[in-house]
Image: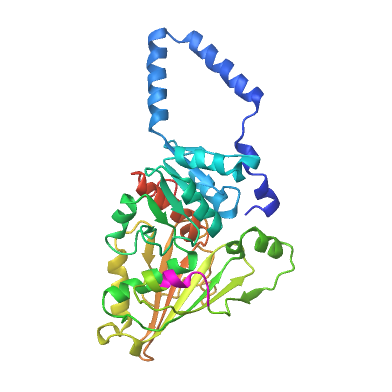
Amino acid sequence: HPSIETREFVMPVFALSASSVLGASRARLESRRRTPPSTRSRVIRVDAMAASLKKKVFIDGEAGTTGLQVRDRLAGRDDIEIISLTGDDRKDPAKRAEFLNAADAAILCLPDDAAIEAVALCTDPDTVIIDASTAHRVAEGWAYGFPELNPEQKQKVANSKRIANPGCYPTGMIALTRPLVDAGYLPKGTGLVVHAVSGYSGGGKQLMAIYQSGEAEPWGAYGFNLKHKHLPEMAEYSALGRKPIFCPSVGSFEQGMVVSVPIHYDQLHETGRSGEAIQKCLEERYAGSKFVSVRPLNKTDDLERGAFLRPDSLNDTNNLELSVFASDEQGQVWLCARLDNLGKGASGAAVQNMNLALGLPEDSGL
Protein backbone atom coordinates (compact mmCIF):
# COMPACT_ATOMS: atom_id res chain seq x y z
CA HIS A 1 0.00 0.00 0.00
CA PRO A 2 1.29 3.49 -0.82
CA SER A 3 2.58 5.68 1.92
CA ILE A 4 0.64 8.76 2.98
CA GLU A 5 3.02 10.93 0.97
CA THR A 6 2.25 8.88 -2.15
CA ARG A 7 -1.50 9.03 -1.49
CA GLU A 8 -1.35 12.83 -1.38
CA PHE A 9 -0.12 12.88 -4.97
CA VAL A 10 -2.53 10.38 -6.48
CA MET A 11 -5.07 12.95 -7.62
CA PRO A 12 -2.95 14.92 -10.16
CA VAL A 13 -2.57 11.71 -12.17
CA PHE A 14 -6.17 12.10 -13.28
CA ALA A 15 -5.66 15.62 -14.67
CA LEU A 16 -4.78 16.17 -18.33
CA SER A 17 -2.38 18.90 -19.40
CA ALA A 18 -3.43 21.47 -21.99
CA SER A 19 -0.91 20.08 -24.49
CA SER A 20 -2.23 16.54 -24.11
CA VAL A 21 -5.80 17.73 -24.61
CA LEU A 22 -4.72 19.68 -27.73
CA GLY A 23 -2.86 16.65 -29.06
CA ALA A 24 -5.86 14.44 -28.54
CA SER A 25 -8.08 16.98 -30.30
CA ARG A 26 -5.73 17.05 -33.33
CA ALA A 27 -5.75 13.25 -33.47
CA ARG A 28 -9.54 13.20 -33.42
CA LEU A 29 -9.67 15.85 -36.17
CA GLU A 30 -7.27 13.86 -38.35
CA SER A 31 -9.36 10.74 -37.79
CA ARG A 32 -12.50 12.63 -38.81
CA ARG A 33 -10.82 13.73 -42.09
CA ARG A 34 -10.20 10.08 -42.95
CA THR A 35 -13.73 8.95 -41.97
CA PRO A 36 -16.66 9.15 -44.43
CA PRO A 37 -19.31 11.71 -43.38
CA SER A 38 -22.04 9.08 -42.96
CA THR A 39 -19.82 7.02 -40.66
CA ARG A 40 -18.81 10.14 -38.71
CA SER A 41 -22.44 10.98 -37.94
CA ARG A 42 -23.09 7.47 -36.67
CA VAL A 43 -19.97 7.60 -34.48
CA ILE A 44 -21.01 10.97 -33.03
CA ARG A 45 -24.49 9.64 -32.21
CA VAL A 46 -23.06 6.51 -30.55
CA ASP A 47 -20.53 8.56 -28.57
CA ALA A 48 -23.23 10.95 -27.41
CA MET A 49 -25.51 8.08 -26.42
CA ALA A 50 -22.71 6.35 -24.47
CA ALA A 51 -21.88 9.58 -22.66
CA SER A 52 -25.52 10.16 -21.75
CA LEU A 53 -25.81 6.66 -20.27
CA LYS A 54 -22.90 7.13 -17.90
CA LYS A 55 -23.83 7.85 -14.30
CA LYS A 56 -22.17 10.93 -12.82
CA VAL A 57 -20.59 10.25 -9.42
CA PHE A 58 -19.19 12.90 -7.08
CA ILE A 59 -16.93 11.81 -4.22
CA ASP A 60 -17.08 14.54 -1.59
CA GLY A 61 -13.85 14.05 0.33
CA GLU A 62 -12.07 12.07 -2.37
CA ALA A 63 -8.58 13.02 -1.13
CA GLY A 64 -9.04 11.10 2.13
CA THR A 65 -8.30 7.44 2.79
CA THR A 66 -11.81 6.17 2.00
CA GLY A 67 -12.31 8.63 -0.86
CA LEU A 68 -9.16 7.49 -2.62
CA GLN A 69 -10.22 3.87 -2.25
CA VAL A 70 -13.66 4.62 -3.69
CA ARG A 71 -12.08 6.37 -6.64
CA ASP A 72 -9.71 3.45 -7.24
CA ARG A 73 -12.68 1.07 -7.33
CA LEU A 74 -14.52 3.24 -9.84
CA ALA A 75 -11.50 3.89 -12.07
CA GLY A 76 -11.75 2.34 -15.51
CA ARG A 77 -15.49 1.70 -15.41
CA ASP A 78 -17.27 2.62 -18.63
CA ASP A 79 -20.63 3.14 -16.91
CA ILE A 80 -19.41 5.81 -14.48
CA GLU A 81 -18.17 9.36 -14.95
CA ILE A 82 -16.40 10.77 -11.90
CA ILE A 83 -16.88 14.51 -11.49
CA SER A 84 -14.29 16.12 -9.25
CA LEU A 85 -13.40 19.36 -7.54
CA THR A 86 -9.78 20.39 -7.19
CA GLY A 87 -7.78 22.65 -4.90
CA ASP A 88 -9.68 25.20 -2.83
CA ASP A 89 -12.94 24.38 -4.64
CA ARG A 90 -13.20 21.25 -2.49
CA LYS A 91 -13.94 23.48 0.51
CA ASP A 92 -16.17 25.96 -1.32
CA PRO A 93 -19.82 25.32 -0.28
CA ALA A 94 -21.17 26.77 -3.51
CA LYS A 95 -18.97 24.57 -5.67
CA ARG A 96 -19.74 21.51 -3.56
CA ALA A 97 -23.47 22.23 -3.86
CA GLU A 98 -23.14 22.52 -7.64
CA PHE A 99 -21.43 19.14 -7.93
CA LEU A 100 -23.66 17.41 -5.38
CA ASN A 101 -26.75 18.45 -7.32
CA ALA A 102 -25.23 17.59 -10.70
CA ALA A 103 -24.40 14.03 -9.66
CA ASP A 104 -26.52 10.93 -10.06
CA ALA A 105 -24.82 9.69 -6.90
CA ALA A 106 -22.68 11.44 -4.29
CA ILE A 107 -20.47 9.46 -1.93
CA LEU A 108 -19.61 11.39 1.22
CA CYS A 109 -16.20 10.48 2.65
CA LEU A 110 -16.25 13.16 5.31
CA PRO A 111 -16.31 13.73 9.07
CA ASP A 112 -19.80 13.77 10.56
CA ASP A 113 -20.29 17.56 10.62
CA ALA A 114 -19.12 17.97 7.03
CA ALA A 115 -21.38 15.12 5.92
CA ILE A 116 -24.40 16.78 7.53
CA GLU A 117 -23.47 20.00 5.73
CA ALA A 118 -23.17 18.16 2.41
CA VAL A 119 -26.64 16.65 2.78
CA ALA A 120 -28.05 20.12 3.40
CA LEU A 121 -26.29 21.44 0.28
CA CYS A 122 -27.89 18.79 -1.92
CA THR A 123 -31.37 19.99 -2.86
CA ASP A 124 -31.95 17.59 -5.76
CA PRO A 125 -34.18 14.77 -4.45
CA ASP A 126 -32.99 12.50 -7.27
CA THR A 127 -29.34 12.57 -6.23
CA VAL A 128 -28.44 9.36 -4.42
CA ILE A 129 -26.38 10.18 -1.33
CA ILE A 130 -24.22 7.50 0.28
CA ASP A 131 -22.81 8.75 3.57
CA ALA A 132 -19.73 6.92 4.87
CA SER A 133 -19.73 8.88 8.15
CA THR A 134 -21.62 7.92 11.31
CA ALA A 135 -23.96 10.91 11.02
CA HIS A 136 -27.00 9.17 9.53
CA ARG A 137 -26.64 5.48 10.38
CA VAL A 138 -29.59 5.39 12.74
CA ALA A 139 -31.36 8.45 11.33
CA GLU A 140 -34.95 8.29 10.16
CA GLY A 141 -35.34 8.24 6.40
CA TRP A 142 -31.96 6.64 5.73
CA ALA A 143 -31.49 3.07 4.52
CA TYR A 144 -28.76 1.15 6.32
CA GLY A 145 -26.23 0.17 3.66
CA PHE A 146 -25.67 -3.46 4.60
CA PRO A 147 -27.64 -5.16 1.80
CA GLU A 148 -27.16 -8.56 3.43
CA LEU A 149 -28.85 -7.44 6.67
CA ASN A 150 -32.01 -9.41 5.88
CA PRO A 151 -33.79 -10.66 2.75
CA GLU A 152 -35.51 -7.30 2.19
CA GLN A 153 -32.56 -4.96 2.73
CA LYS A 154 -31.01 -5.17 -0.73
CA GLN A 155 -34.21 -3.92 -2.34
CA LYS A 156 -34.55 -1.24 0.33
CA VAL A 157 -31.07 0.05 -0.53
CA ALA A 158 -31.84 -0.13 -4.25
CA ASN A 159 -34.97 2.00 -3.77
CA SER A 160 -33.37 4.59 -1.50
CA LYS A 161 -31.90 8.01 -2.27
CA ARG A 162 -30.34 8.29 1.19
CA ILE A 163 -28.04 5.44 2.23
CA ALA A 164 -25.92 5.29 5.37
CA ASN A 165 -22.79 3.22 4.84
CA PRO A 166 -22.19 0.90 7.83
CA GLY A 167 -19.21 1.16 10.13
CA CYS A 168 -16.46 -1.41 9.71
CA TYR A 169 -16.79 -2.96 13.17
CA PRO A 170 -20.62 -3.08 13.08
CA THR A 171 -20.52 -4.81 9.69
CA GLY A 172 -18.82 -7.80 11.28
CA MET A 173 -20.82 -7.79 14.52
CA ILE A 174 -24.21 -7.39 12.83
CA ALA A 175 -23.46 -10.03 10.19
CA LEU A 176 -22.75 -12.54 12.97
CA THR A 177 -25.64 -11.73 15.31
CA ARG A 178 -28.62 -10.53 13.25
CA PRO A 179 -29.42 -13.97 11.77
CA LEU A 180 -29.36 -15.50 15.26
CA VAL A 181 -31.76 -12.85 16.58
CA ASP A 182 -34.09 -13.28 13.61
CA ALA A 183 -34.10 -17.05 14.12
CA GLY A 184 -34.98 -16.66 17.79
CA TYR A 185 -31.69 -18.22 18.90
CA LEU A 186 -30.29 -15.05 20.45
CA PRO A 187 -32.91 -13.27 22.58
CA LYS A 188 -33.38 -9.54 22.18
CA GLY A 189 -31.80 -7.61 25.02
CA THR A 190 -28.93 -10.08 25.45
CA GLY A 191 -25.81 -8.40 26.78
CA LEU A 192 -22.83 -9.29 24.57
CA VAL A 193 -19.13 -8.50 24.60
CA VAL A 194 -17.56 -7.74 21.21
CA HIS A 195 -13.81 -7.73 20.63
CA ALA A 196 -12.20 -6.46 17.44
CA VAL A 197 -8.82 -5.60 15.98
CA SER A 198 -8.35 -3.32 12.96
CA GLY A 199 -5.48 -2.21 10.81
CA TYR A 200 -4.29 1.32 11.53
CA SER A 201 -5.69 2.68 8.24
CA GLY A 202 -9.04 2.81 10.02
CA GLY A 203 -7.76 5.82 11.95
CA GLY A 204 -7.19 7.90 8.81
CA LYS A 205 -4.11 9.77 7.72
CA GLN A 206 -3.08 11.00 11.16
CA LEU A 207 -2.92 7.54 12.70
CA MET A 208 -1.35 6.14 9.54
CA ALA A 209 1.44 8.72 9.82
CA ILE A 210 2.15 7.68 13.41
CA TYR A 211 2.38 4.00 12.57
CA GLN A 212 4.41 4.57 9.41
CA SER A 213 6.88 6.68 11.37
CA GLY A 214 7.74 3.62 13.44
CA GLU A 215 6.84 5.34 16.71
CA ALA A 216 3.53 3.58 17.40
CA GLU A 217 2.84 0.84 19.89
CA PRO A 218 2.61 -2.70 18.37
CA TRP A 219 -0.99 -3.08 19.54
CA GLY A 220 -3.37 -0.83 21.40
CA ALA A 221 -6.84 -1.18 22.86
CA TYR A 222 -9.06 1.89 23.06
CA GLY A 223 -12.65 3.00 23.68
CA PHE A 224 -12.37 2.80 27.45
CA ASN A 225 -15.11 5.40 27.96
CA LEU A 226 -17.54 2.74 26.61
CA LYS A 227 -19.04 5.30 24.21
CA HIS A 228 -17.66 4.20 20.86
CA LYS A 229 -19.50 5.87 17.98
CA HIS A 230 -20.41 2.50 16.43
CA LEU A 231 -22.48 1.33 19.39
CA PRO A 232 -25.87 2.80 18.32
CA GLU A 233 -25.90 0.98 14.99
CA MET A 234 -24.73 -2.26 16.64
CA ALA A 235 -27.72 -2.14 18.98
CA GLU A 236 -30.14 -1.05 16.24
CA TYR A 237 -29.27 -3.35 13.35
CA SER A 238 -28.31 -6.45 15.30
CA ALA A 239 -31.95 -6.15 16.48
CA LEU A 240 -30.74 -6.83 20.01
CA GLY A 241 -31.84 -3.38 21.14
CA ARG A 242 -28.95 -3.28 23.59
CA LYS A 243 -25.45 -1.91 23.17
CA PRO A 244 -22.72 -4.49 23.66
CA ILE A 245 -19.57 -3.93 25.68
CA PHE A 246 -17.28 -3.13 22.79
CA CYS A 247 -13.52 -3.66 23.04
CA PRO A 248 -11.85 -2.33 19.86
CA SER A 249 -8.11 -2.32 19.20
CA VAL A 250 -5.57 -1.34 16.55
CA GLY A 251 -2.64 -3.51 15.44
CA SER A 252 0.60 -2.66 13.69
CA PHE A 253 -0.68 -3.64 10.24
CA GLU A 254 -2.21 -1.26 7.74
CA GLN A 255 -5.37 -2.94 6.58
CA GLY A 256 -7.74 -5.74 7.59
CA MET A 257 -9.99 -6.61 10.51
CA VAL A 258 -11.34 -9.40 12.70
CA VAL A 259 -14.47 -8.94 14.83
CA SER A 260 -15.19 -11.53 17.55
CA VAL A 261 -18.45 -12.27 19.39
CA PRO A 262 -18.12 -14.98 22.09
CA ILE A 263 -21.39 -16.41 23.43
CA HIS A 264 -22.25 -18.83 26.22
CA TYR A 265 -24.92 -21.35 25.25
CA ASP A 266 -27.02 -20.35 28.25
CA GLN A 267 -27.38 -16.92 26.56
CA LEU A 268 -29.09 -18.68 23.65
CA HIS A 269 -32.53 -20.21 23.28
CA GLU A 270 -32.44 -23.97 23.67
CA THR A 271 -32.99 -24.50 19.93
CA GLY A 272 -29.76 -22.63 19.14
CA ARG A 273 -27.46 -24.33 21.62
CA SER A 274 -25.22 -26.23 19.23
CA GLY A 275 -22.51 -25.41 16.76
CA GLU A 276 -24.46 -27.10 13.98
CA ALA A 277 -27.59 -25.02 14.62
CA ILE A 278 -25.63 -21.76 14.58
CA GLN A 279 -23.65 -22.79 11.50
CA LYS A 280 -26.84 -23.71 9.61
CA CYS A 281 -28.49 -20.43 10.60
CA LEU A 282 -25.65 -18.36 9.14
CA GLU A 283 -25.29 -20.51 6.04
CA GLU A 284 -28.99 -20.21 5.24
CA ARG A 285 -29.00 -16.43 5.74
CA TYR A 286 -26.07 -15.79 3.40
CA ALA A 287 -26.72 -18.51 0.80
CA GLY A 288 -26.31 -16.95 -2.64
CA SER A 289 -24.62 -13.79 -1.34
CA LYS A 290 -22.03 -12.32 -3.66
CA PHE A 291 -19.82 -11.06 -0.88
CA VAL A 292 -20.61 -12.83 2.42
CA SER A 293 -19.41 -16.39 2.96
CA VAL A 294 -19.52 -18.79 5.90
CA ARG A 295 -16.54 -21.05 6.49
CA PRO A 296 -17.14 -24.67 7.55
CA LEU A 297 -17.87 -25.28 11.21
CA ASN A 298 -14.74 -25.36 13.40
CA LYS A 299 -12.44 -25.14 10.38
CA THR A 300 -8.86 -24.62 11.57
CA ASP A 301 -6.68 -26.38 9.00
CA ASP A 302 -6.26 -23.21 6.95
CA LEU A 303 -5.26 -20.95 9.84
CA GLU A 304 -1.84 -19.32 9.77
CA ARG A 305 0.64 -21.85 11.17
CA GLY A 306 -2.36 -23.91 12.18
CA ALA A 307 -3.42 -21.44 14.85
CA PHE A 308 -3.90 -17.82 13.77
CA LEU A 309 -6.81 -16.17 11.96
CA ARG A 310 -5.10 -13.45 9.93
CA PRO A 311 -6.95 -10.12 9.76
CA ASP A 312 -5.55 -9.11 6.37
CA SER A 313 -6.45 -12.10 4.17
CA LEU A 314 -9.36 -10.28 2.48
CA ASN A 315 -7.58 -6.99 1.83
CA ASP A 316 -8.60 -5.09 -1.32
CA THR A 317 -11.85 -7.06 -1.63
CA ASN A 318 -15.47 -6.41 -0.68
CA ASN A 319 -15.70 -9.85 0.92
CA LEU A 320 -16.88 -10.69 4.43
CA GLU A 321 -16.02 -14.09 5.84
CA LEU A 322 -17.78 -15.58 8.88
CA SER A 323 -16.51 -18.39 11.10
CA VAL A 324 -18.18 -20.47 13.81
CA PHE A 325 -15.89 -22.08 16.40
CA ALA A 326 -18.10 -24.02 18.80
CA SER A 327 -17.68 -26.42 21.69
CA ASP A 328 -20.94 -28.15 22.56
CA GLU A 329 -19.12 -29.82 25.43
CA GLN A 330 -18.09 -26.48 26.93
CA GLY A 331 -21.37 -24.84 25.97
CA GLN A 332 -19.64 -21.95 24.19
CA VAL A 333 -19.29 -20.55 20.70
CA TRP A 334 -16.82 -18.01 19.33
CA LEU A 335 -18.13 -16.19 16.25
CA CYS A 336 -15.60 -14.37 14.04
CA ALA A 337 -15.98 -12.03 11.09
CA ARG A 338 -13.05 -11.16 8.84
CA LEU A 339 -13.10 -8.28 6.37
CA ASP A 340 -11.09 -5.46 4.88
CA ASN A 341 -11.81 -2.41 7.01
CA LEU A 342 -11.36 -0.25 3.89
CA GLY A 343 -13.29 -2.69 1.67
CA LYS A 344 -16.54 -4.18 2.94
CA GLY A 345 -15.97 -1.94 5.95
CA ALA A 346 -15.90 1.31 3.93
CA SER A 347 -15.21 1.95 0.22
CA GLY A 348 -16.28 -1.44 -1.11
CA ALA A 349 -19.61 -1.22 0.69
CA ALA A 350 -20.10 2.33 -0.65
CA VAL A 351 -19.58 1.15 -4.24
CA GLN A 352 -21.86 -1.86 -3.69
CA ASN A 353 -24.59 0.43 -2.36
CA MET A 354 -24.07 2.90 -5.19
CA ASN A 355 -24.39 0.11 -7.76
CA LEU A 356 -27.67 -1.05 -6.26
CA ALA A 357 -29.14 2.46 -6.00
CA LEU A 358 -28.19 3.31 -9.60
CA GLY A 359 -29.54 0.06 -11.03
CA LEU A 360 -26.11 -1.25 -11.97
CA PRO A 361 -24.78 -4.80 -11.40
CA GLU A 362 -24.16 -5.16 -7.66
CA ASP A 363 -20.58 -6.37 -8.08
CA SER A 364 -19.40 -3.87 -10.72
CA GLY A 365 -15.95 -2.60 -9.78
CA LEU A 366 -15.77 -5.09 -6.92
Closer-to-camera residue (256/104) = 104
In the rendered image, residue 117, in percent from the top left (x then y), is placed at 52, 52
Which residue range is magenta in the image? 227-234
Closer-to-camera residue (86/286) = 86
Colouring style? rainbow
Whether residue 330 is situated above or below residue 73 in the rendered picture: below
Query: In the picture provided, is 335 more to the left or to the right than 153?
Result: right
Residue 110 seen in this snapshot: no
Query: In the picture provided, is 277 more to the left or to the right than 170?
Result: left
Question: Is residue 228 a member of the stretch shown in magenta?
Answer: yes
State the residue at coordinates (65%, 49%).
7
State the residue at coordinates (61%, 71%).
251
Question: Is residue 73 a member of the stretch shown in magenta?
Answer: no
Assign the N terminus to one quadrant of the image: bottom right
The mark total stands at 0
Residue 135 seen in this snapshot: yes
In the rendered image, residue 211, in percent from the top left (x then y), is placed at 69, 65
Whether residue 359 is situated above or below residue 44 in the rendered picture: below
Query: In the picture provided, is 234 more to the left or to the right than 316?
Result: left
State the residue at coordinates (42%, 13%).
40
In the rendered image, residue 98, in percent from the top left (x then y), is placed at 50, 38
Q: Quadrant of residue 249?
A: bottom right
Whether residue 111 is situated above or below residue 93 in the rendered picture: below
In the rendered image, residue 330, in percent from the top left (x then y), is placed at 39, 91
